[in-house]
Amino acid sequence: MTKTPKASGKKTAAKAPEATSNPVAVAGAAIERALVDPLTSALKRAGLRRAQKSAGETTPAPAAAAPAKPASTGAGKPGLAVSPLAVPFPVIPPIAGVEIATGRAGFYKHEREDLLLMRFAEGTSAAGVFTRHGVGSAPVDWCKRQLAATGGADVRALVVNAGCANSFTGKPGADAVRRVATAVGKRLDCRQRDVMMASTGVIGVILDDSKITARLPEVESRLTADAWAQAGRAIMTTDTFPKGAFATAMIDGVEVKIAGIAKGSGMIAPDMATMLAFVATDAAIAPAALQTLVSLYTRTTFNCVTVDGDRSTNDTLLLFATGQSGAPKISRPGDKRLADFRDKLEHVLLDLALQLVRDGEGATKFVKITVNGAESPASARKIARTIAESPLVKTAFAGEDANWGRIVMAVGRADEPVAREKISVKFGDFYAARDGLISAEYDEAKMSAYVKNQEFEVSVDVGVGKGSATVWTCDLTKQYVAINGDYRS
């Protein structure tokens, strides 16, 4: 999550994906434009079906978990209470070929770690999905350019800082990224283009790269295979709990591991991936196949959550495959040996995405919104996002008011085909409206009691087709205003 120095409150217009010369990135973009390849089309349909199946559950079943850590661990912004919707950080074992270390570079006034370094084994494949925001950032530009140059092959390191987004910083910001990558490359004996970069924090501030390079020897000395929880905390900004996910999968009879962390709680409305998310596996997967998978499952996970409707300049999702598990190397995304891996990868991405909503700034409600009967899945998704991002709807959720009229309002202003005389609205199992009118079984007391739950569902049928989509969101409270009113204080 990044923050502008002064929030305008104006929703950013959608932009087309930025093109790169990277063939694997082009392959991912092609999925979004037109699924002409039969195999990819089948994979995409399967992904959408699985996402809708997952929508029947509030959240994916978590891995074995350790006790949740309070906000007082030094991560995040001081004084913020842990979200009432928080989930514990899972137990994540070492991933072969991945080493992790964290440190304090000093981008924050208060004492906390704000620097993450990951080192990967030789031959690690990488793929990424990035923000389509019109401004973008220096680290996003860097990653896209280097992945294009290497084709995602043999990526050796990742450096992440919190506290400074290094966005809207022109050539000085780009030079700062290059200097960090050069310093890391020298220390880890790799090329600067083998180093991925990510930043989060305040927009418009040039990255002081000397703060990072000065700490590199100390951080490098602490590299270990078992530091996923520390990594999750180091990248937090206004997050109130670290976010992680883990799963195992079988590839041709060999067990492989998938682990990931993410950060974000405000300026959350991904139009590509997430705020910052880093996922690693010890599977051996070729870069082109890895890119296809991450592009495909971004659509059914991170692109289906929203906190406030504002997209970030720094959104980055990077997926690394070290090839250290002993499983055979897979070159095609549709290879039948990847079936279980594809399911588990989507599970990990969805788990991380839903945790972002659970940590929405000031959130007290976790809400699943499903739209059925739309002209197409894309139309359903737009209607669901319009509902999920409506300030009037979200404040009604905060006030525990089952104000179904606001739902209908949002449906209409999505500017998608609907049949007014067929629209229905449900809160859980309770019909508020049916066939374009207030429902005959409408029961205000039951619906009001239902929305007092911390987690609930809203479903809408717009009566024109078979398209459906699910979006997850949270409420909008006074605390959201308080957090963002003094973000830089």
Image (cartoon, rainbow, N blue to C red):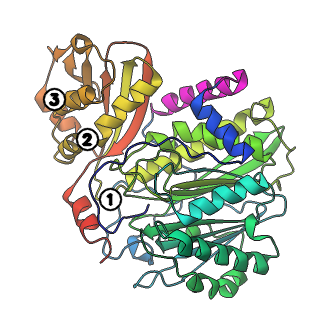
Residue count near mark 3 (Cα–Cα under 10 Å), binned few <14, some 14–19, many ≥20: some
Residue corresponding to mark 2: 390
Residue corresponding to mark 3: 405
Q: Which span is picked out in magenta?
A: 36-56
The residue closer to the viewer here, 146 or 228, is 146
| Mark 3 secondary-structure assignment | helix
Q: Is residue 46 inside the magenta stretch? A: yes
Residue type for callout 1: Glu
The image quadrant where one finds the N terminus is: bottom left
Residue type for callout 2: Ser
Q: Is residue 88 left or right of residue 389?
A: right
Find residue 174 and report its horizontal and vertical position in percent: 58, 70
- Cα distance, mark 2 to mark 1? 16 Å
Residue corresponding to mark 1: 361
- Cα distance, mark 3 to mark 2? 12 Å
| Mark 1 secondary-structure assignment | loop
Which quadrant holds residue 477?
bottom left
